[in-house]
Image (tube, grey):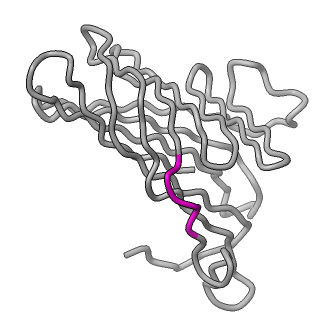
Amino acid sequence: WYVVGQIDATDRGAPQRLAFELTVARLSDPVRAGLSGWAALFSFIDPQAGTYRAAERRVWPPRSPLDVEPTQLRFQVGDGEALVRAEDWILEGYDGSWHLRARLPSGEGVDLDLRSRRPAARFGDQGVVDYGGAETMAWYSWTRLEATGTAYDGKMVRPVQGLCWMDHQWGAPHLEGYTWK
């Protein structure tokens, strides 16, 4: 999952642009060629203050979904719903309506409701991207999510609104030697 957004705080005169990104990814061990864990990265950007801050959370090695502690990375996906949780970072939703909450140890973060104004875009052939041979991944994007909620700029809670983009890719490709451009 990738969620990227630009949001504006308008509570103190001229709008102040803020930005964030939450990425949650499966990591694999190339030696064992199996699932080795999960990682989540959250970053917060305040261009006016000239700050970029980021933090990462990992669950390594993976555990059975039944063994995962509530403070660890947790996934629940079914009937179109998803809950992705990395400690207190949460992305949950259904069919174009999402809630995202993440905060860095330094205090910056977001608590946003995201609503799609367009249907999800599916990539490749009906949402399946062929990387050659048996290497395929499913991929869709919500390209225009309206965001409302609050941002924490490290000093105070600010009401915000803006636009976000969310990608979700999944599958089990072994893209050895593949170069992203």
- Is 150 situated above or below 62? above
| Between 155 and 165, the one nearer to me in the picture | 165
| Between 48 and 96, the one nearer to me in the picture | 96
Quadrant assignment, res 106: top left
- Is 23 situated above or below 67? below
Residue 126 at x, y percent in the picture? 68, 79
| Farthest front residue in view | 117
Location of the C terminus by quadrant is bottom left
Quadrant assignment, res 148: top left
Residue 133 at x, y percent in the picture? 70, 91
Question: What residue is at 41 percent from the left and 46 percent from the top?
Answer: 164
Question: What residue is at 85 percent from the left and 48 percent from the top?
Answer: 79
| Farthest right residue in view | 66
| Magenta stretch, residue numbers | 116-121
- Is 140 situated above or below 103? below
Dominant secondary structure, magenta: loop
